[in-house]
C-alpha cells in the first residue's frame, strides 16, 4: 500500500504520484476541507490503521468518545481529525471477522454524524468498501471498472452510468461487480441512471476559468431553464410537479430556506412573492432556522433553494420544517439526482448545467428565473394575474437570455473599473428594495474571490451607522436601476459623495445618474422592470471576476472554501 499526501492543490499530489512511479489499479483519495485539525499533511487523508486505509467526507460527531475508547484499546492517533477514529474502529472490528464489508458495517453502527466513506486494505487490494450517511456518494459503472465519487461531474470523464447511493447504504466494489446493502446487511437494488450531463459540460473549453465560463453561459443556462415556457401561452403549476396545483394553491404563506448565494435568491423572491403574488413570505438562513424555536403553520409552502442539493444545513432545515408538520415542500435545485430533490413534494430543476467554480453565478440567475416563475404561478392560483399580464410576463421571461447577453457585452468597461478598484481593501455595496439582495450578492462575490472586505447595506440604512466608514479609501458600489426607489437612492449616493467616497454606480439606460469627479457610472442597456434584479447581478459577477484577476487570486478555488458544503 502506498500513501501519498500533500497540502495544496491536487496537481501537487499528481506530481508526487508521477515522481514515485506508483503502480496499481485500486485507490482511494479525498480533497480535505478542514473541519477538525488544521490543513496539514498529517491531517490529510487517507488515514491508516494497520494495513487499512480510509477516506471520509463529513463529520463524525462522536469522535471524541470513540477516540478515548480506541486509545484505551491501545490505538495510537497520528492526526487531529475525526476521520482517524474510523480507520482504527474498522481495524478493531477486523479482529473478529475476516470480511472488510462486515467490519465496516459493524463500525458504522457505532458512528454518529455524516459520512461518505471509502475503505480498503493492503491484504486485499481488489476490494473497496464505501458507505453513505448524510454526505453525497455515487458509483460510476465504467467498462474498465467501478468508481465512487461525491459528485457526478467527477466521473463524467470515465462514465455516464451512475448509481446514486442512499443514506444508510453501503457497497462493496470488487473486480466482478458491486454489491449494495443497508448497514444491517439487507441487500438493496439501486437503479442505474444514465447521466444527462456531457463530459464537455465540465471542460473549460475556450475559457481561462470556470467562473468566467459560467458567467458567460448564463444566456444559455437561462434559456434552458425557461425552455418549458418558451412556446407556452399560459403558465401551468405543473412546472413544479404533478401535485403542484394543490400544494401551491393551498399555501397561506411561504418560507424560503437556503444558504449563501441561494439565500440571496430567496431574498429577491420575497419582494416578488409579496408584491406580485400577494402571499406573505419569510426567508431564513438554513443554519439558523434549523436550530431556532419558530412558530410553524402547516399551510406554509417551504421552498428550499440549492445549487448542489447537498448543502447539509439546507437539508437539515428542510427536515426540521417537515418535523414541525409542514408538508408542502418545494426544492429549487440544479442537480436532479441530489438529496434535496428526493426530499420534497415538488421540485423545479434549474438547468444551468454543472457549476464548477466555487463562486456561484449561473446557478443564482437560474434560481431567480425559477423563483419568478413560482411567483407568477402563485399569483395566477391566487387570482392576481390576468390573462393580459400573463402574456406580457411570459414575453418578458422569454427575453431574459437575450437581455443577459447584452449585459455581458459591458465587460470591457467593467474590466477598466476592476483596474481602478483592485488596490482597495474594503468596499461598501448599496441597493434598495429587491436590489438590496443583489448588493449582498455582489459583496459576497467580491469577498469570496478577491478577498477584499465587502459589506452590503440597504441604502437607506447608510445614515444609521455605516456612513461613518465612508472616506476616500472606502469605495461604494451602488445597484441603481430606474425603479421607484431611484430618487431615494440618489440622495443616499449624495451622502456618500459629500464625504469623499468614490462611487461606482451600476445604473439603467434611463437612470439619469451622470458621471462626475469620483462618480463612475455604467449603464445597463435596457430597463427590465421586476426582472431587473436578475440582470443587475451579472455586471457585479463580472466585476468581482476581473478584480480577482487583477489581484491574481485563485478564482475558481478561493482559499478556505469548498464548492459543496456537505458538512454542518
Ligand atoms: C457563494 C456560494 C455559496 C453557496 C452556498 C449554498 O458563491 O457558492 O454561498 O451559495 O454554499 O450552496 P448550495 O446552493 O449548493 O446549497
Image (spheres, rainbow, N blue to C red):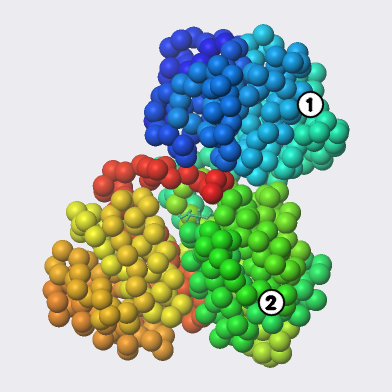
| Residue 471 lies in quadrant | bottom left
Q: Which quarter of the rendered picture does the N terminus lie within?
A: top right
Q: Is residue 215 left or right of residue 462?
A: right
Q: Which mark is residue 178?
A: 1
Q: Is residue 354 left or right of residue 323?
A: left
Which residue lies at the image location 43% right of the left edge and 80% below the top edge?
A: 433
Instruction: Kindly tell me whether mark 2's CB lies below 8 Å from ligand 1.
Output: no
**Which class describes the residues within 10 Å of circle 2: few (<14), some (14-19), or many (20+)?**
some
Q: CB under 8 Å between callouts 2 and 1? A: no
Between the residue at mark 2 and the residue at mark 1, the CA separation in whole angstroms equals 45 Å
At x 51%, y 76%, the residue is 531
Up/down of 453 relative to 169, above or below: below
Disc marking residue 170: none
Q: Quadrant of residue 173?
A: top right
Question: Vertically, is 481 above or below 213?
Answer: below
Q: Nearer the viewer, residue 54 or 410?
A: 54
The picture places residue 556, in percent across and down from the top left corner, at: 42, 44
Residue 186 visible at all: yes
Where disc 2 sits, the SS reads loop
**Dot 2 corresponds to which residue?**
297
Seen from the viewer's position, the closer of residues 62 and 321 is 62
Nearest to the observer: residue 77 or residue 175: 77
Kindly identify the residue that appears in the image at 25 percent across and 73 percent down.
Answer: 466
Amino acid at each position: 500500500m502506498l500513501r501519498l499526501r500533500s497540502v495544496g492543490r491536487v496537481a501537487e499530489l499528481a506530481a508526487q504520484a508521477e515522481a514515485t512511479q506508483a503502480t496499481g489499479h485500486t485507490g482511494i483519495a479525498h480533497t480535505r476541507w478542514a473541519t477538525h485539525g488544521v490543513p496539514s499533511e498529517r491531517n490529510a487523508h487517507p488515514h491508516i490503521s494497520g494495513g487499512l486505509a480510509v477516506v471520509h467526507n463529513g463529520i463524525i460527531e462522536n469522535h471524541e468518545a470513540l477516540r478515548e475508547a480506541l486509545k484505551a484499546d491501545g490505538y495510537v492517533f497520528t492526526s487531529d481529525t475525526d476521520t482517524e477514529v474510523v480507520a482504527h474502529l474498522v481495524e478493531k472490528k477486523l479482529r473478529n471477522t475476516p470480511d472488510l464489508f462486515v467490519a465496516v458495517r459493524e463500525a458504522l453502527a457505532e458512528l454518529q454524524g455524516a459520512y461518505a466513506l471509502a475503505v480498503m486494505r493492503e491484504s486485499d487490494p481488489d476490494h473497496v468498501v464505501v458507505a453513505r450517511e448524510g454526505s453525497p456518494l455515487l458509483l460510476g459503472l465504467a467498462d474498465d471498472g467501478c468508481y465512487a465519487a461525491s459528485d457526478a461531474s467527477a466521473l463524467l470523464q470515465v462514465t455516464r452510468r451512475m448509481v446514486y447511493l442512499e443514506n444508510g447504504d453501503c457497497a462493496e466494489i470488487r473486480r466482478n461487480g458491486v454489491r449494495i446493502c443497508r448497514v444491517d446487511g439487507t441487500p438493496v437494488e439501486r437503479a442505474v441512471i444514465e447521466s444527462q450531463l456531457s463530459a464537455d459540460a465540465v471542460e473549460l473549453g475556450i475559457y481561462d476559468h470556470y467562473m468566467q465560463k459560467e458567467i458567460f453561459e448564463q444566456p444559455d443556462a437561462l434559456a434552458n431553464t425557461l425552455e418549458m415556457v418558451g412556446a407556452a401561452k399560459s403558465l401551468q403549476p405543473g412546472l413544479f410537479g404533478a401535485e403542484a396545483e394543490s400544494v401551491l394553491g393551498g399555501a397561506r404563506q411561504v418560507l424560503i430556506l437556503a444558504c449563501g448565494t441561494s439565500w440571496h435568491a430567496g431574498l429577491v423572491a420575497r419582494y416578488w412573492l409579496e408584491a406580485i403574488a400577494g402571499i406573505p413570505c419569510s426567508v431564513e438562513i438554513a443554519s439558523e432556522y434549523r436550530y431556532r424555536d419558530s412558530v410553524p403553520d402547516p399551510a406554509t409552502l417551504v421552498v428550499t433553494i440549492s445549487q448542489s442539493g447537498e448543502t447539509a444545513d439546507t437539508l437539515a432545515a428542510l427536515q426540521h420544517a417537515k418535523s414541525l408538520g409542514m408538508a408542502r415542500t418545494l426544492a429549487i435545485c440544479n442537480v436532479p439526482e441530489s438529496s434535496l430533490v428526493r426530499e420534497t413534494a415538488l421540485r423545479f430543476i434549474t438547468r444551468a448545467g454543472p457549476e464548477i467554480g466555487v463562486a456561484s453565478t449561473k446557478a443564482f440567475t437560474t434560481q431567480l428565473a425559477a423563483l419568478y416563475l413560482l411567483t407568477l404561478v402563485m399569483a395566477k392560483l391566487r387570482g392576481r394575474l390576468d390573462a393580459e399580464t400573463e402574456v406580457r410576463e411570459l414575453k418578458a421571461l422569454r427575453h431574459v437570455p437575450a437581455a443577459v447577453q447584452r449585459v455581458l457585452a459591458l465587460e470591457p468597461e467593467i474590466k477598466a473599473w476592476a483596474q481602478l478598484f483592485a488596490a482597495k481593501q474594503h468596499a461598501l455595496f448599496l441597493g434598495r428594495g429587491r436590489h438590496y439582495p443583489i448588493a449582498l450578492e455582489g459583496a459576497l462575490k467580491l469577498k469570496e474571490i478577491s478577498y477584499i472586505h465587502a459589506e452590503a447595506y440597504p441604502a437607506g440604512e447608510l445614515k444609521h451607522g455605516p456612513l461613518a466608514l465612508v472616506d476616500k479609501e472606502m469605495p461604494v458600489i451602488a445597484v441603481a436601476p430606474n425603479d421607484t426607489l431611484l430618487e431615494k437612492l440618489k440622495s443616499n449616493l449624495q451622502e456618500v459623495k459629500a464625504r469623499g467616497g468614490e462611487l461606482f454606480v451600476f445604473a439603467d439606460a434611463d437612470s439619469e445618474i451622470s458621471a462626475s469627479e469620483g462618480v463612475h457610472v455604467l449603464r445597463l442597456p435596457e430597463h427590465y422592470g421586476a426582472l431587473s434584479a436578475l440582470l443587475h447581478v451579472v455586471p457585479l459577477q463580472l466585476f468581482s471576476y476581473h478584480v480577482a484577476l487583477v489581484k491574481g487570486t485563485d478564482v475558481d478555488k478561493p482559499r478556505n472554501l469548498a464548492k459543496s458544503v456537505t458538512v454542518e
